[in-house]
């Protein structure tokens, strides 16, 4: 009898698990997409994911791969499992000071691990590798209303940052590569980020999958 | 033609057929695409991938001069050999973070209904829809005088709710379902509604935002299969604490076909019912704090007792005379002293210790002390338990539990129990009378998770 009771209990448990997973699909079917996430297909049919990291109203999507950062807001994007890449984006300062772009960090770690920073402001640019200053100049600057192409190559230890037609900044870093590229508007600036393109250089294949 | 069209679309069988096709298709898609597995339903996984690049240059400088004299007066090629080796290695690593992927996940909810139907037609589910379940009156035929205040009962099995992100992420909206729900206003078929995977929309207004939460929850639900109905109501919720919740309901359920509209007021409880607020869904599982020493699906112990004959088969002479079965047991830590005293209960406590010895307890009260013997794996738990309905029983004992995994533990239990039935039990348990029994037994806890002291939210226990 005890065996019978145990068998019935186990069977019920298994049926419940199957039904619960069915219920999960049912609910997922009715749920709208997360309003803080967006997706697009970049070159090579690469699926890219973006996420609004501040309030929904402060990041306004202008196209599937472009947005405007309002006030002091931030958004990030990535292509899963791509840690070595070339990313290109058109930046236009609409008002305020400028934009900060960060790589070699993650959304979760951004507060404690600065990664590689590019501050593109109306006073000039500043590139830092963590605490180490790579470049600081006022000969390249953001001009309000003028769109500029920013290219970042993250290739192993070598970083290459190009702003418009200026000579690119090439340097070596010891920071580990990550999938994320984070953008933040500086001090209530309004900045347009558009035409984001991620070109994969290498697909990460972690053994811990 | 218009009438035929109207009748066709109002036909319950059409909606039932469509619903069956829909559910079948859904489950097929779910199986084929591996969408919505149980693991995915409970846990949302985030992965961050890192690539660490190492570049290494080795320079090997060797000079091998031949022995003997050498004329240094003329130009002579050097024997120095310089070899430069450049290596690059890239190591990928992944950091995985796991978060809860639900707002509410519950095994079972039971509600005792007032004013939902006629008393003489009542199913006599009793208080919380549970206390009358083992009585002789339960689900007896219609038009009979019945005891108790609660003519109806509302049961739900396998409830889940997910965050609904709409209206610019308005707070605390959820969309949910349950595997099965059954509303019985009374025994009249027109006041009985059954739903499989009904869809419920809920919004919680939290009055207390700390554990245990207190919330007012308006809800609107619709079921298409097998009965078509709408259920609108509001509930006052307290919980969850160790998976236990208490709720009062006010609502109306109305059939979309020929069935009645039943207003109802209910008082209910639910077990293995876990509620997360939205900020908790952004907190990794490993950082979640718990209120209980143990929460489980069931605990079953085969016991050797001093009863004369076994409960299940009186003709055998087995030393194991019965079982102690606890459905949905929970031991909630009391934040006093070293937090090791606990208050426990279970949905149903079967104490079937012999052919006539034993009883049944619904939501019994248990007080105990949780003592960890060895490396958080082995615990000793002396306890005293009072079962007040439908049998009045006092049960004292001690349990030794060995954690095998988070899902299963092995138990050795010894104790003493005495009591008697205080209501007329149904025919399955009618032979249980007054008893006075010592026992010792061995059993298992199924999906019975024993927590460690550092997992408790009080964080002060040693």
Image (cartoon, rainbow, N blue to C red):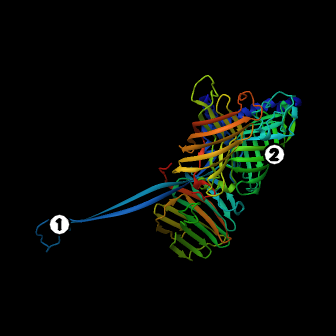
Callout 1: 10 Å neighbours few (<14), some, many (20+)?
few
Horizontal and vertical percent position of residue B346: 68, 42
Instruction: Look at the image and tell me in which quarter the N terminus of chain A lies.
Output: top right
- Choose between B162 and A116: the one closer to the eye: B162
* Residues at circles 2 and 1 in contact by the CB criterion of under 8 Å: no
Viewed as shown, does residue A192 lie left or right of B80?
A: right
Of marks 2 and 1, which one's residue comes earlier in the chain?
1
| Nearer the observer, B341 or A148 | B341
Q: Where is residue B406 in the image (x, y as percent from the top left)?
A: 57, 45
Q: Mark 2 points at which residue?
A: B249
> Which callout, 2 or 1, points to the residue nearer the camera?
2
Residue at disc 2, secondary structure: strand
Q: How far apart are marks 2 and 1 (CA)?
A: 98 Å
Label 2: chain letter: B
In the rendered structure, the residue with mark 1 lies on which chain? B
Q: Residue B144: x, y in percent?
A: 86, 28
């Amino acid at each position: 009898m005890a065996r019978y009771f145990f068998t019935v209990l186990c069977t019920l448990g298994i049926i419940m698990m199957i039904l619960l997973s069915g219920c999960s699909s049912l609910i997922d079917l009715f749920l709208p997409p997360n309003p803080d996430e967006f997706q697009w297909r970049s070159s090579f049919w690469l699926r890219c994911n973006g996420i609004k990291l501040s309030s929904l109203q402060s990041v306004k999507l202008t196209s599937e791969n472009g947005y405007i950062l309002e006030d002091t807001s931030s958004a990030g994007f990535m292509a899963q499992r791509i840690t070595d890449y070339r990313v290109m984006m058109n930046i236009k300062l609409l008002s305020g000071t400028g934009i900060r772009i960060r790589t070699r960090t993650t959304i979760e770690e951004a507060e404690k691990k600065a990664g590689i920073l590019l501050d593109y402001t109306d006073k000039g640019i500043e590139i830092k590798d963590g605490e180490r200053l790579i470049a600081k100049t006022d000969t390249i600057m953001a001009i309000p209303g003028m769109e500029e192409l920013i290219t970042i190559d993250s290739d192993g230890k070598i970083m290459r940052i190009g702003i418009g037609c200026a000579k690119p900044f090439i340097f070596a870093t010891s920071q580990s590569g990550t999938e994320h590229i984070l953008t933040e508007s500086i001090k209530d600036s309004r900045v347009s980020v558009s035409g984001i393109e991620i070109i994969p250089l290498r697909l990460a294949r972690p053994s811990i999958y | 033609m218009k009438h035929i069209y109207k009748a066709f679309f109002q036909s319950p069988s059409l909606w039932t057929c469509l619903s069956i096709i829909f559910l079948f298709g859904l489950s097929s898609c779910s199986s084929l695409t591996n969408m919505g597995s149980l693991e995915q339903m409970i846990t949302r996984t985030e992965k961050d991938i890192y690539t660490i690049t190492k570049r290494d240059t080795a320079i090997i400088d060797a000079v091998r001069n031949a022995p003997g004299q050498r004329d240094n007066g003329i130009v002579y090629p050097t024997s120095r050999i310089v070899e430069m080796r450049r290596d690059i290695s890239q190591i990928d690593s992944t950091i995985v973070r796991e978060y809860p992927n639900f707002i509410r996940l519950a095994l079972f909810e039971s509600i005792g209904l007032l004013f939902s139907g006629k008393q003489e037609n009542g199913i006599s589910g009793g208080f919380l829809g549970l206390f009358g379940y083992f009585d002789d009156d339960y689900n007896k035929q219609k038009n009979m005088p019945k005891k108790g205040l609660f003519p109806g009962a509302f049961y739900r099995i396998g409830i889940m709710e997910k965050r609904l992100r709409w209206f610019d992420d308005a707070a605390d909206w959820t969309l949910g379902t349950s595997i099965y729900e059954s509303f019985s206003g009374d025994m009249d078929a027109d006041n009985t509604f059954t739903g499989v995977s009904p869809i419920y929309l809920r919004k919680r207004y939290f009055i207390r935002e700390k554990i245990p939460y207190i919330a007012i929850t308006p809800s609107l639900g619709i079921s298409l299969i097998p009965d078509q109905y709408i259920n609108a109501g509001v509930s006052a919720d307290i919980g969850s604490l160790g998976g236990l919740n208490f709720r009062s309901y006010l609502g109306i359920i109305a059939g979309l076909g020929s069935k009645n509209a039943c207003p109802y007021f209910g008082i209910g409880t639910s077990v293995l019912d876990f509620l997360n607020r939205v900020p908790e869904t952004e907190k990794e599982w490993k950082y979640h704090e718990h209120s209980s020493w143990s929460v489980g699906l069931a605990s079953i112990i085969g016991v050797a007792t001093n009863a004369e004959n076994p409960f299940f088969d009186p003709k055998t002479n087995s030393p194991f005379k019965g079982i102690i079965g606890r459905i949905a047991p929970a031991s909630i830590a009391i934040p006093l002293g070293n937090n090791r005293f606990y208050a426990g209960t279970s949905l149903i406590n079967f104490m079937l210790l012999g052919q006539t010895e034993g009883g049944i307890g619904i939501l019994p009260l248990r007080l105990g002390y949780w003592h960890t013997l060895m490396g958080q794996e082995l615990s000793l738990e002396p306890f005293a338990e009072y079962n007040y309905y439908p049998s009045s029983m006092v049960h004292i004992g001690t349990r030794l539990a060995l954690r095998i995994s988070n899902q299963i533990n092995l138990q050795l239990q010894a104790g003493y129990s005495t009591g008697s039935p205080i209501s007329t039990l149904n025919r399955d348990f009618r032979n249980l009378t007054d008893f006075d029994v010592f026992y010792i037994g061995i059993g298992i806890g199924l999906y019975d998770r024993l927590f460690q002291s550092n997992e408790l939210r009080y964080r002060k226990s040693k």
